[in-house]
């Protein structure tokens, strides 16, 4: 995944990094060492770790979700690998609210016609949904807008006991569900995507059933409700309890502690599958970078810290626990946080996080990634849809410059993206996102190679500027 860059590019990149550079008098790392690292970090090396994660999932019920034996085995593998490579490893335990769906969710149209929706694609229960069996009229709430259900005023005139029909949009699912419950809704259905998305309400506390539904389901229910009314039955059977999971954090024994560079990826999968692209690809990449830097004897100027986060899929819980536990001084000492989440999507794009709204200077991190891809004559796209959706979010909240790479999830590839990157327009960047088929076959090796090159390049450059 790492790419090398010529000395002149390094000089230009240092100028672009501006405020997060140590100064013009310091010499950049020789380009031959960057080349050595790029050549050492190979797709095969990344895939060796991914294969181990796939084996762990197969040995533990098909997934590596937080709070399960599959996750614990993954964390043990990562910690052992990093200790063997000579890093100082800390396993940070934390408690989190575990969630399980006890029975498949149900959504039935009772009137004006009878129809049952498939719980494997058309509908899903959202994590931390409450339980219940409700039959009531469905009522759209701002269904034509992306802010549907985000504010209490959206529910003005809502009739208590009805089922709220909401559209996926700009605010968190938990916010929508909370506003619906406060307005007296007996259940909520949030529509968006060709298929029902996998999502979380963020934390327990919602008592009503909350389902995700595909866009076609939502549109039909909204039309029937507008034409004279529709009644639906919503059923969810869930359980929440506190469990323990962990983050694995490893750092170099040398380097300036007042200029720490952090590189992270989430280690957990969703319960539906082994999570080999999401996010075995990011985890395996930074694990390979850490190993090869150690083998090459590279000692960056800054302390370098690799983080493998638990419970990301439940709402960024591991990275939030870590970031919120930092003192003000510890947060200020983090020069940059680089996040790598899904790097080998089979119909993917080279996305670079666009978090320019973060006043800490994340735009400079974004520019560094874009400049690197340009130096390799590769197209890359700034992407702002991941703001708050992955583990860089808690660090941005602490004022740390953040950035990262992403190859796409459930979103469809545009026609322009297909022209620039190949692949199928209109199809999801990762058709197996949050599904059982997110396995070792769910990769574009060429894209994974390019993205892992960029990840390694940025890791070394930021740690040595």
Image (cartoon, helix red, strand yellow):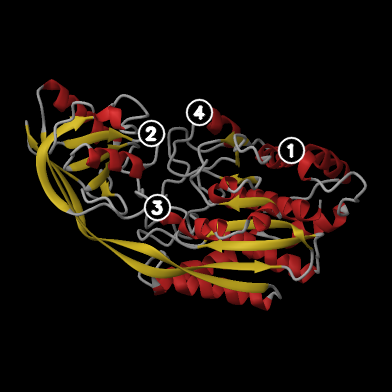
Which residue in the rendered view is the most extreme toward the top? 227
Which type of secondary structure does the marked residue at label 4 adopt?
A: helix
Pinpoint residue 457: horizontal percent, then vertical percent. Answer: 74, 51
Q: Is residue 5 left or right of residue 327?
A: right
Q: Which residue is mark 4?
A: 415
Q: Which residue is mark 1?
A: 371
Instruction: Please state which of the two labelled residues, at mark 1 or mark 2, is closer to the viewer.
Output: 2
Give the Cα distance between marks 1 and 2.
Answer: 31 Å
Q: Which residue is mark 2?
A: 169
Find residue 191 and report its image quarter.
top left
N-terminal-most mark, 3 or 4? 4
- Badge 3, how many Cα within 10 Å: few under 14, some, many 20+? many
N-terminal-most mark, 3 or 1? 1
Q: How many marks?
A: 4
Instruction: Please state which of the two labelled residues, at mark 3 or mark 4, is closer to the viewer.
Output: 3
Q: Which residue is mark 3?
A: 434
Give the Cα distance between marks 3 and 1.
Answer: 31 Å
Location of residue 89 with respect to 114 vertically, above or below = below
- Badge 2, how many Cα within 10 Å: few under 14, some, many 20+? some
Location of residue 59 with respect to 113 vertically, above or below = below
Pointer 2 with pointer 3, Cβ within 8 A? no
């Amino acid at each position: 995944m790492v790419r090398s860059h010529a000395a002149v590019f390094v000089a230009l990149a240092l100028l672009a990094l501006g405020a997060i550079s140590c100064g013009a008098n310091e010499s950049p790392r020789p380009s031959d060492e960057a080349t050595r690292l790029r050549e050492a970090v190979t797709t095969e090396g990344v895939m060796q770790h991914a294969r181990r994660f796939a084996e762990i999932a197969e040995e533990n019920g098909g997934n590596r979700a937080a709070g399960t034996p599959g996750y614990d085995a993954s964390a043990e593998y990562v910690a052992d690998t990093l200790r063997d490579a000579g890093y100082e490893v800390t396993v940070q335990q934390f408690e989190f609210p575990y969630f399980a769906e006890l029975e498949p969710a149900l959504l039935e149209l009772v009137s004006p016609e009878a129809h049952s929706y498939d719980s494997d694609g058309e509908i899903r229960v959202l994590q931390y949904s409450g339980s219940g069996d409700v039959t009531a009229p469905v009522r759209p709430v701002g269904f034509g807008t992306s802010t549907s259900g985000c504010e209490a005023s959206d529910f003005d005139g809502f009739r208590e006991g009805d089922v709220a029909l909401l559209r996926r949009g700009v605010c968190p699912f938990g916010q929508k569900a909370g506003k619906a419950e406060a307005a007296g809704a007996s259940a909520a259905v949030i529509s968006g995507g060709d298929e029902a998305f996998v999502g979380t309400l963020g934390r327990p506390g919602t008592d009503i059933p909350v389902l995700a539904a595909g866009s076609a389901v939502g549109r039909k229910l909204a039309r029937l409700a507008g034409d004279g009314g529709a009644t639906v039955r919503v059923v969810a059977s869930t359980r929440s309890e506190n469990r323990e999971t962990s983050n694995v954090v490893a750092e170099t024994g040398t380097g300036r502690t007042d200029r720490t560079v952090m590189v992270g990826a989430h280690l957990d999968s969703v319960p539906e599958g082994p999570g080999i692209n999401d996010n075995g690809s990011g985890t395996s990449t930074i694990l390979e970078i850490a190993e090869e830097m150690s083998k090459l004897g590279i000692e960056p100027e800054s302390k370098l810290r690799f983080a493998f986060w638990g419970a990301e899929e439940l709402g960024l819980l591991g990275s939030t626990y870590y970031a919120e536990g930092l003192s003000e001084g510890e947060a200020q000492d983090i020069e940059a946080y680089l996040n790598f989440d899904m790097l080998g999507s089979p119909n993917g794009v080279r996305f670079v996080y666009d978090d320019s709204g973060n006043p800490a200077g994340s735009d400079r991190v974004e520019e560094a990634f874009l400049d690197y891809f340009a130096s390799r004559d590769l197209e890359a796209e700034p992407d702002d849809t991941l703001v708050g959706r992955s583990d860089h979010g808690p660090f941005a909240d602490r004022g740390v410059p953040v950035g990262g790479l992403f190859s796409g999830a459930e979103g469809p590839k545009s026609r322009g993206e297909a022209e620039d990157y190949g692949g199928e327009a209109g199809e999801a960047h990762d058709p197996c996102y949050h599904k059982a088929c997110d396995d070792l076959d769910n990769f574009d090796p060429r894209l994974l190679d390019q993205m892992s090159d960029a990840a390694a390049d940025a890791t070394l450059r930021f740690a040595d500027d």
